[in-house]
Amino acid sequence: MKELRHLNKYFLKYKYKLIVGIIITIIARIFLLFTPRYVRKIFTAIEQALDGTLTKEAFRSELFIAILYIVGAAVVAGIFTFLMRQTIINVSRYIEYDLKNEIYQQYQRLSLNFYKKNRTGDLMNRISEDVGRVRMYAGPAIMYSINTITLFVIALIFMFNEAPMLTLYTVIPLPILSVAIYKLSREIHKRSTIVQEYLSKLSTFTQESFSGIAIIKSYGLELQTATNFTELSNDSRDKQLSLVKVSALFFPMMILLIGVSNLMVIYIGGLQYINGEIESLGTIAEFIIYVNMLTWPVATVGWVTSIVQQAEASQKRINEFLKIESEIQNPTQEPFHIVGDIAFNNVSFTYDDTNIQALKDVSFKVNHGETLAIIGKTGSGKSTILDLIGRLYDIDSGTLLIDENPVNLINLNDLRTNLGYVPQDAFLFSDTIKNNIKFGKEDATDEEVIQAAKYAQVHKNIMGFKNGYDTILGERGITLSGGQKQRISIARAIIKDPKILLFDDCLSAVDTETEEKILKNLNKLTSGKTTIIVSHRISAAKNADKIIVLDNGKIIESGTHETLINTDGYYKDLYLKQLSESDAK
Ligand SMILES: Nc1ncnc2c1ncn2[C@@H]1O[C@H](COP(=O)(O)OP(=O)(O)OP(=O)(O)O)[C@@H](O)[C@H]1O
């Protein structure tokens, strides 16, 4: 229960609702227990009518009153049972909602390193399935526990008052039932976890197959994929069947144990009646109803124990994530007004998951209003430089200064709101084109959206779609070409009007003519802003104020386009190669 203590703050938050729920549960059970007592009264009345101690008239009225009580109590118990679910189960839904939000907010706080170390499926599981299991503890487990305790205590008091020996014999099989259900629930849980694993394997497989349907079709892999699917679904079916086998035992076992208890009541009760130890046959009838009433709550003791154990395990997994402190923390609430000077002094950085040293002693400076181009082979560390400026990771050594302040001492929110980052793989949400652009500035007007799209040279493409800026992208909408995605992603950064613009090879899928136009527009737009353009193309770098060339994490050349094409090295070779390629076209 140690891990589940995390939920105490939520129980405290909803304490009044819970207390009302508990009172309602107790009332509901008390009314439910009216029935057996009135059944006994009916039996006693019948006996008295038969031996003549009760007149026909009196018997009728006794019978009528008893039936009225039974019906009335059942109606009241029904209403309170409804209210009991409305209060306690509702509280568990509130707690589920709060916990999901708490986990989601923690996910958002955590750094990229966290996401690299944990699989997306695992993150999703903890926020959905694990929270679901914890909810079962916060709601049904608590409700059934109160239910069982109340029913048991009241029923036992009534029963002991009536016939103490008979009570003892009647309750003997109940703990056996409880233990048996507990064992069965554990087995059911074990098997259903395996079933769940197979279900998620199946859904991952189908999701990947449909996302990659173009590849499957073009390589003629339909048959092979279908065979793989069949194998997986055969395994899944076998696991389902093994689960069904165990869960099918649940009710027969309950019925068997109820039967045994009923037989004991009838046998022992019968003997006691013959010996005159109990006054009326009505007591036997009353006890049979008690046994049937108590069986389900007793069975739930086993079930609830297994729910609590599962919830404890799930909450442990949730707590593991909640306890993690983000490596990237906002160091201050002090506002920081960014101008845009960036300086790297002997910066080195190693990715701790792969141990790859992506940057080694890198030093350069870009003043506000200047444009820096970064050129280099793949894997040379270009994107890493941009990630470090946005503080997605912290540097290992050296200094990274923004306006002469170490980046890790600047207000993180101010830093990031002043950055316009266009990643290498443009990511667009399944939403309208307009909203995708407005992601950079939520309150942007339609005119601003159109202007940004024009600067990014994508306005004409957008107007070519039937629904224009309201065109839905993604799974339910249209699929854009790589170049179109990149340009929408550029428009998103432009509309933000940030102090620092970071373009990570984001014109790679655009033809050189469009690239030229976009760069010209950017020139106009970026006056006064610091711009860093990562590219494999000389055309994107040539107008920059400064160019650095990276190789294997080190700066191997730096200067302007003019100086670099006159110096033997990587830049000049690349320039000559790309020049001859464009001449050949
Ligand atoms: N998130 C990451 N985790 C671990 N290692 C990484 C990560 N990102 C990059 N690396 C490694 O760091 C090195 C530098 O990568 P980086 O992405 O900065 O290169 P790049 O010059 O931008 O390459 P490209 O031109 O292909 O985009 C590479 O060896 C890469 O494998």
Image (cartoon, rainbow, N blue to C red):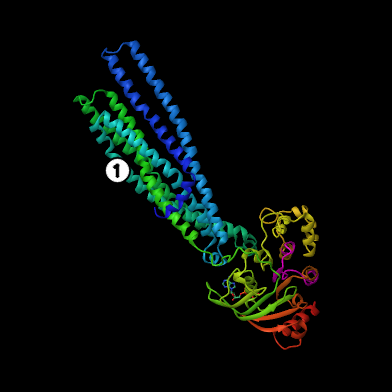
Badge count: 1
Residue situated in front as seen by the camera: 263 or 406: 406
Indicate the secondary structure of the residue bearing disc 1.
helix
Residue 550 lies in quadrant = bottom right
As for residue 352 lying within the magenta part, the answer is no
Left or right of 446, for residue 7 = left
Quadrant in the picture for residue 356: bottom right
> Quadrant of the image for the C terminus?
bottom right
Identify the amino acid type marked 1: Ile
Q: Is residue 133 visible?
A: no
Rendered location of residue 184, percent (x, y): 36, 47
Q: Nearer the viewer, residue 575 or 221?
A: 575
Query: Ligand 1 is in which quadrant of the figure?
Result: bottom right
Q: Relative to 472, say whether 542 is above or below.
A: below
Residue 347 shows in the view: yes
Q: Position of residue 18 (x, y in %)?
A: 46, 41
Measuring 32% from the left and 42% from the top, which residue is drawn there?
177
Residue 254 falls left or right of residue 210: left
- Determine which residue is flagged by label 1: 176
- The residue shown at (49%, 49%) is 132
Magenta extent: 493-520
Cβ of disc 1 within 8 Å of ligand 1?
Answer: no
Vertical arrangement, residue 213 with respect to residue 542, above or below: above
